[in-house]
Image: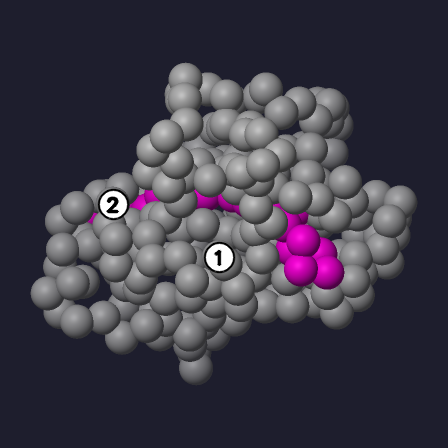
Amino acid sequence: QALHRTANFGPAILCPLRSRAALPDLSWDGQQFWLSVSVTMEITPDYVNSLTSPTDTFLCPLSANIYKIDFIAFKIRALSDEGETVLFDIRKDPDEEEPPIDDDLDDSVRSIKYHFGPKFLKYPTIGTSLEFTVGEYPLHNFRMIERHYFRDILIKSYDFTMPFVMPHSNNTWEVIYTMPELDPDLKQAIIECPWETRSDSFYFVQDQLVMHNKADYNYAPQ
């Protein structure tokens, strides 16, 4: 059961966001994250793959999505030799009016909370289907990097690439996740500490960050 789903469920700019801890000498008002050009940095795939804990902030603004990538449906299912079990399935209302991109929108618009329960941790393989549309520009090397953490422990990192996406197209991205074998003590801690398992999903086009979504997970009994 997902408790909250964003309009975006779940690209050539510099993304001038860095964690608060990394900027001890800069003023911080809790709302304004844009920094001067002198301290901006390009967020690359290598950089996000080097992260050892969830980010404190989103690493690019909503306006980074210049390709108008819109996630319109998402399904999660457990896979086995006997077949598949649908765990989560959502589709955006086709009549829903898309709000204009506004960097001042609350961060909740790109965050989600999932309550899966402990059984989810027993599945060896998970499949997802992400349906999305694209605007007037094609996508070259559309890449998703997903980093999953329990507290500050990296549990698993996934990296998938779609080589090309046509402009003005409706697409379905099928992804298969091999679930990590968790130490029994770590698995029990994950179950006993709801919402302390988190993920960052980074979306790149030609190695430039265009979207960043976050998720929190609860594996306690429902």
Task: State the residue position of label 1.
Answer: 48
Pointer 1 local density, CA inside 10 Å: few below 14, some 14–19, many at least 20: some
- Residue 59 location (% of width, % of height): 52, 42
Pointer 2 local density, CA inside 10 Å: few below 14, some 14–19, many at least 20: some
Residue farthest left in this picture: 185
- Residue 222 location (% of width, % of height): 23, 43
First to last magenta residue range: 204-220
The residue closer to the viewer here, 67 or 209, is: 209
**Residue 117 visible in this rendered orientation of the protein:** no
In this picture, residue 172 sits left or right of residue 178: right
Main secondary-structure element of the magenta-colored stretch: strand
217 part of magenta stretch: yes
Q: Secondary structure at mark 2?
A: loop
Is residue 26 depicted above or below 131 in this figure? above
- Mark sitting earlier along the chain (2/1): 1
The residue closer to the viewer here, 42 or 147, is: 42
> What kind of residue is marked 1?
Val
- Residue 199 location (% of width, % of height): 40, 51
Task: Specify the label residue 196 is tagged with.
Answer: 2
The colour mode here is one colour
The residue closer to the viewer here, 109 or 50, is: 50
> What kind of residue is marked 2?
Glu
**Residue 158 visible in this rendered orientation of the protein:** yes
In this picture, residue 5 sits left or right of residue 189: right
In this picture, residue 203 sits left or right of residue 155: right
In which image quadrant can residue 105 be found?
A: top right
